[in-house]
Amino acid sequence: MKLSQRFSYGFSIAAAVLVCQAAGAGAPADGSQGVTSRGATSAGSAAGQQSATAGPLAPMAGINGTPAPGTPRVPGQNPHGLQVYLRAGLKTHGPGLHDYPQFLADWSKLLTEHGAIVTGSLHAPLAQELTNVSVLVIYKGDAGYLTDADREALEAFVERGGGIVSIHDALCGPDPAYFATLVGGGKKHGDVNYTLEANVPYTVVDTSSPLMKGIAGVSLRDEAFFNMTWATSPKIHVLATTVIDGTPSAGAHKGEVVPQIWTYEHSLPGGQPARTFVWMQGHKYANLAEPQIQTMLLRAIAWAGRHPVEELVDYEPPPPASGAIPTPATQGAAK
C-alpha cells in the first residue's frame, strides 16, 4: 500500500492527535503540542495510543512502550520489530509543506506495515518514552530548541547507542554547533540559509552505499540548505550532494555543491557508538512519498537501528491466524 493512498484518511488520525492533546493537562514547554500532556504521553494514554500511533506492542501500552499485562496484540503488528519513535510537531507552513502531523499519521501506519514497532508524538520525547526505542525519527522544524529535560533525554538516548534519522529542518535551532554533535550538521535558526522552491538534483557521492540504491538521477522540487555548521571530529560521511539552485534567497551561494544526504557515526563522551542519517529535503511533504525517497528512508531507519538495511523494505507480514480479523497488511500478505 503506497503512502499516497493514505492521504485520504490520514487527517483523521492527525485530528485525533490534537483532540487527545486538548484533553490533556497542558502543552509542552517547547511550544509544540503532544498527543497528551507532558505527564501522560502518547504512549501512556489509551486514546492517544490508539489514535496517534500504530501502537508499540499493543493498544494502551505504558509510557515506555510495554503493554499492560494481558493486553491483546495489535492485529498485524510484528512483536519483534525494530522500535521506532516518530517525533513530529504542529504544522508550520502552507498547504503541502512541513506537514508534521500528517507524517505522524502516515508513517506510523507505513512503518507498522513494514514490520516496525511504532510510537510517537508532537512533542520532544520524554526519557521514559525512549526506553525501548532503537531509532528516533525527527520530522519537526527547529527541533534544536530543547529544554534541559529534552536535551538530557536526547543525550541519554544517543549515549546508549540510539539512532537518529533527521528530516529537513529538524537540524535547525539556536545552537547549530551543539546539534551537529548529534547529527553531524546544524543550521542556525533565523539565517537566510535556504533556496525555498528550487530544483534539487542529487549527485550520489558514495555509490557503494546501500542507502543510496535508486537515488542516482533523482531530482526533486524542494528546498536545499547551504550554510551549515559541520561536525569536525568525526566528520560526516557524505552520501549525496546537490548544486544550489539560483533562487533569490540563495544569492551568492548559487552553484555551490553542498551535501544534502549523509550519515554520521560517532560516540558521545563515555557513550556507545551511535548512528545518524540525515536527509535535508522534505519541505514539500509529498516528496516523502516518492518511491525512491520512501525506500531510502526505510533503509535509513533500519540502518540507524543497526538492523539489516533491507529489513523494513523486504518485510512481509505473516498470514493472519485462523479466525483473526484481517488488517490491510495481512490482507495483502494473504493475496
Image (cartoon, grey):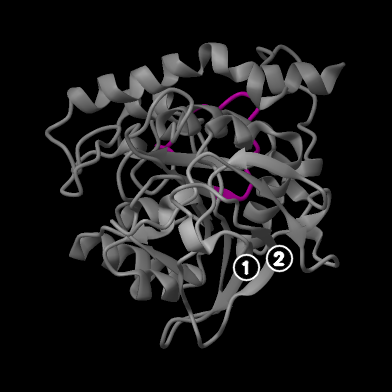
Q: Nearer the viewer, residue 62 or 99?
A: 99
Q: Is residue 154 left or right of residue 105?
A: left
Q: Nearer the viewer, residue 226 or 52?
A: 226
Q: Are marks 1 and 2 in contact (CB under 8 Å)?
A: yes
Disc 1 residue type (three-letter): Thr
Per the model, the C-alpha gap separating discs 1 and 2 is 7 Å
6 horizontally vs 71: left or right: right
Give the magenta-colored segment's residue range: 67-83
**Above or below, 69 relative to 186:** above
Q: Which residue is mark 1?
A: 263
Q: Quadrant of the N terminus?
A: top right
Q: Amino acid at mark 2?
A: Leu
Q: Residues within 10 Å of mark 2 (few under 14, many from 20)?
A: many
Residue 258: where, in percent of width, then height? 60, 65
Q: Nearer the viewer, residue 278 or 97?
A: 97
Q: Secondary structure at mark 1?
A: strand
Q: Which quarter of the figure is the C terminus placed in?
A: top right
In this image, 297 relative to 61: left or right?
Answer: right
Instruction: Describe the element under mark 2 as helix, strand or loop.
Output: strand
Tell me the number on the disc at residue 239.
2
Residue at (31%, 63%) from the top-left corner?
153
**What secondary structure prevails in the magenta region?**
loop
Q: Which residue does the image show at 34% across and 74% down from the upper left?
A: 178
